[in-house]
Image: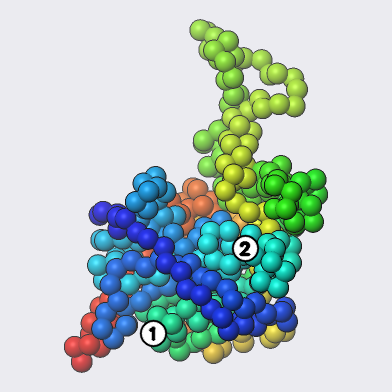
Amino acid sequence: MSSIGIVSPQSMQFAEPLPLQSGAAIADYTLVYETYGTLNADKSNAVLVCHALNASHHVAGVYADQPKNVGWWDNMVGPGKPLDTDRFFVIGVNNLGSCFGSTGPMHINPASGKPYGAEFPVVTVQDWVTAQARLADRLGIEQFAAVMGGSLGGMQALAWSTMYPDRLRHCVVIASTAKLSAQNIAFNDVARQAILTDPDYHGGDYYAYGVVPKNGLRVARMIGHITYLSDDDMAEKFGRKLRATNPADTDDENGAERDYHFGFGVDFEIESYLRYQGDKFSEYFDANTYLLVTRALDYFDPARAFGGDLSKALANSRAQFLLASFATDWRFAPERSREIVRALIDNKRRVTYAEIDAPHGHDAFLLEDARYLNLVRTYYDRIWDERNSKVAA
């Protein structure tokens, strides 16, 4: 299997205002997207891939001027890969409010001539799906072969199945949920508070001050990253290993462990790892975007309008479904996927479900696991075979 190779982002501008669930609207916005593979004559082989919190439209391949910038799901999408671009035309869209090209807080608000900052309207999963549907309209795609996503992307795929039930034949939801638990909302709020209370946040208008609320972003990422890993995975990678800061700090020749520093610096390898992840994140991600995206996670709850009844919320879905969860994912535990499965079965939908015993926690949906990747490959083989049988008929 090879990479899709060099890819280029595209952009599409929309002048017509997009009404948002909050009651606000946004006009003159741009969506950045990438496509892989070839759209067939009847436009029946298109697959939309929805991205998670800190990802983007760059799903697969590399950029000519950034050969190390590999798409976030490159192991999933490409020639001969589970989502095979020799068969399917794959679209990755960067959501509104992002910091990777689509209109977001960093962009100029035409009403003020200044960056939106904290004035950028709150967006929801449903708002993103509406914007994606508009992009599909522009591309002439009336129905997707599948809409697919992991984590927050899975929420978008699920929303597609109810908001536009006739515009997708299959819905692929991986490591996701129909709503956040109170614990998940709590984690998100603590992360947001780290940003909001950073002195460099300046009420969201830090662009004007030429600063970035890096400390808040660092802590937010560290909190989030803890929830993406399993306890077993952390234990195996780091355990209680002490960080060797210089040769004198390493174990002695008899294998005796060095002493603690007895302070509040970095003593343990896990501390060093989290600080590294936080520092890296603060260099490329926008704080206002982080606030918006985590709030979209919090607000997603399609059953809310149906008295909490998920079966009723999914009653108008028409797609066939693949759901996958990971046994060690405590952020979006398998029980959350099983709730969706039960609701779909209540509605007599065709559902394939797998719970994979991978050790990596929530991040497993991004990683190499033969059982997981083969599951997705087999499902897309089925989609392809169904399409060919209809063409032959």
The disc label shown at residue 238, or none: none
Image point 74% across, 62% down: which residue?
118
Q: Quadrant of residue 85?
A: bottom left
Q: Position of residue 393 (x, y in %)?
A: 20, 92
Q: Kindly report which numbered mark, 2 or 1, lies closer to the viewer in this rendering.
A: 2
What separation in Å lies between label 2 and label 1 (alpha carbons)? 28 Å
Please say whether residue 184 is visible from this viewpoint: no
Per the rendering, the mark at residue 107 is 2
> Which quadrant is home to the N terminus?
bottom left
Identify which residue, 255 or 206, lies in the foreground: 206
- Amino acid tagged 2: His
Left or right: 203 with respect to 378?
right
Residue 140: image tag: 1
Residue furthest left as drawn = 392
Q: Residue furthest top?
A: 253
Say left or right for 349 vs 75. right
Looking at the picture, does residue 340 appear above or below residue 285? below
For label 2, the SS is: loop
Q: Position of residue 316 (x, y in %)?
A: 54, 90
Name above or below for residue 335 compared with residue 29: above
Residue 260 placement: quadrant: top right
Which residue is painted at 63% across and 54% down in the image?
286
Please state the horizontal and vertical placement of residue 164, each as a whole percent of the image. 51, 86
Question: Dot 1 surroundings within 10 Å: few (below 14), some, or many (20 or more)?
Answer: few
Point out the tag, 2 or 1, that comes first from the N-terminus: 2
Point out residue 207 in the picture as x, y percentages from the top left corner.
Answer: 69, 53
Whether residue 135 appears in this view of the structure is: yes
User: Neighbour class for label 2 at 10 Å: few (<14), some, many (≥20)?
Assistant: some
